[in-house]
């Protein structure tokens, strides 16, 4: 599951991404084969943290299993 991290909040990507030109038809981030296609990976400082990405709009997205 993908979530958007903003300061001390966790948001559903559909609430943010639906207005993004890079989102897919359903208003979700372009997530395919374990990679965010509309952003780039951020290096984790700990293995206990979920994989994180920064989207083209500047939001931080985490992949939580």
Image: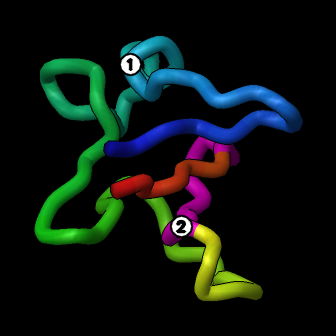
User: Badge 2, how many Cα within 10 Å: few under 14, some, many 20+?
Assistant: few
Q: Quadrant of residue 33?
A: bottom left
> Would you name the residue on which mark 1 appears?
14
Specify the quadrant that holds the N terminus. top left
Where is residue 11 drawn, in percent x and y?
58, 24
Say which element carries label 2: loop
User: Badge 1, how many Cα within 10 Å: few under 14, some, many 20+?
Assistant: some
Of 43 and 56, the residue lying toward us: 43
Where is residue 58 drawn, in percent x and y?
69, 47
Residue at x-position 60% and y-position 59%: 54
Q: Does 45 sit left or right of 2 as displayed?
A: right
Q: Is residue 35 above or below residue 37?
A: below
- Magenta highlight range: 50-59
Specify the quadrant that holds the C terminus. bottom left
Q: Is residue 35 above or below residue 64?
A: below
Foreground tag (2 vs 1): 2
Residue at x-position 62% and y-position 77%: 48
Please tell me which of labels 2 and 1 falls first in the chain. 1
Of 49 and 56, the residue lying toward us: 49
The reply to whether the magenta stretch includes residue 52 is yes
Check the image and name the residue furthest to the front.
48
> Would you name the residue on which mark 2 appears?
50
Q: Does 28 sit left or right of 52 as displayed?
A: left
């Amino acid at each position: 599951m993908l979530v958007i991290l903003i300061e001390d909040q966790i948001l559903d990507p559909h609430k943010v991404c639906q207005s993004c030109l890079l989102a897919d038809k359903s208003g979700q981030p372009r997530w395919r084969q374990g990679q965010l296609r509309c952003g780039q990976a951020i290096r984790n400082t700990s293995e206990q943290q979920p994989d994180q990405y920064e989207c083209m709009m500047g939001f931080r997205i985490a992949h939580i299993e």
